[in-house]
Image (cartoon, grey):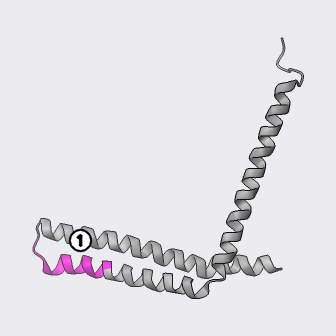
Amino acid sequence: MGIFQPPGPDSDQSDRQSNAADNADSSALQSLHKRIIERAGKDRENLRLFVTGAFVFFFGLCLIVFGNQTVDASVKQEIIVLCGLVVTVIGGACAAAGYICLSIFRIIRILDKK
């Protein structure tokens, strides 16, 4: 028996599975594109997300500086700095998401209209 096998009933089933997978990928991309376009139209919410994220980021940064400058070296200082780091990361992620929504999604929306 050689490497090539003539198509049989199994090949029809694999073709159907491949088409179903392609349709699922296509519908997932269309759904994602629709959500991006909807999110790009919400400028006020995107700006609020960016500003809130920036404030949370700088609050976390203040916690880190406070912990390093005013608290003596101890476990308490490390816990304060760790909390500040976690808050800073969360705020940075929110600010980055807001910035992406404000800039990149808007570009996608403008290009989509053309």
Relative depth, front residue between 70 and 113: 113
Measured from the top left, where is residue 34 in percent x and y? Answer: 71, 70
> What is the residue that sits farthest to the right in this orientation?
6
Few, some or many residues within 10 Å of mark 1 (<14, 14–19, 20+) = many
Q: Residue at x 38, y 70 (%)?
A: 89
Furthest residue toward top: 1
- 77 relative to 64 in the view: left or right: left
Q: Quadrant of the N terminus?
A: top right
In the image, farthest residue toward the bottom: 44
Q: Nearer the viewer, residue 110 or 19?
A: 19
**Quadrant location of the C terminus?**
bottom right
Residue drawn at (73%, 51%) of the image? 24
Q: Amino acid at mark 1?
A: Val
**Which residue is located at x 81 percent, y 32 percent?**
13
Which is the main secondary structure of the residues drawn in magenta? Answer: helix
Q: Give how far across and how far down residue 30 sits, in percent.
A: 74, 63
Dot 1: what SS? helix
Task: Tally the numbered discs.
Answer: 1
Quarter of the view holding residue 47: bottom right
Query: Please, is residue 83 above or below residue 12 in the view?
Result: below
Could you say which is closer to the camera, residue 30 or residue 74? Answer: 30
In magenta, the rendered stretch is: 60-73
Magenta span has 23?
Answer: no
* Quadrant of the image occupied by residue 56: bottom left
Relative to residue 69, is residue 50 drawn left or right?
right
List the residue tagged with mark 1: 81
Question: Is 68 inside the magenta-drawn segment?
Answer: yes
Give coordinates of residue 96: x percent, y percent: 50, 75
Horizontal side, residue 100 vs residue 113: left or right: left
> In the displayed structure, would residue 74 be above or below residue 98?
above
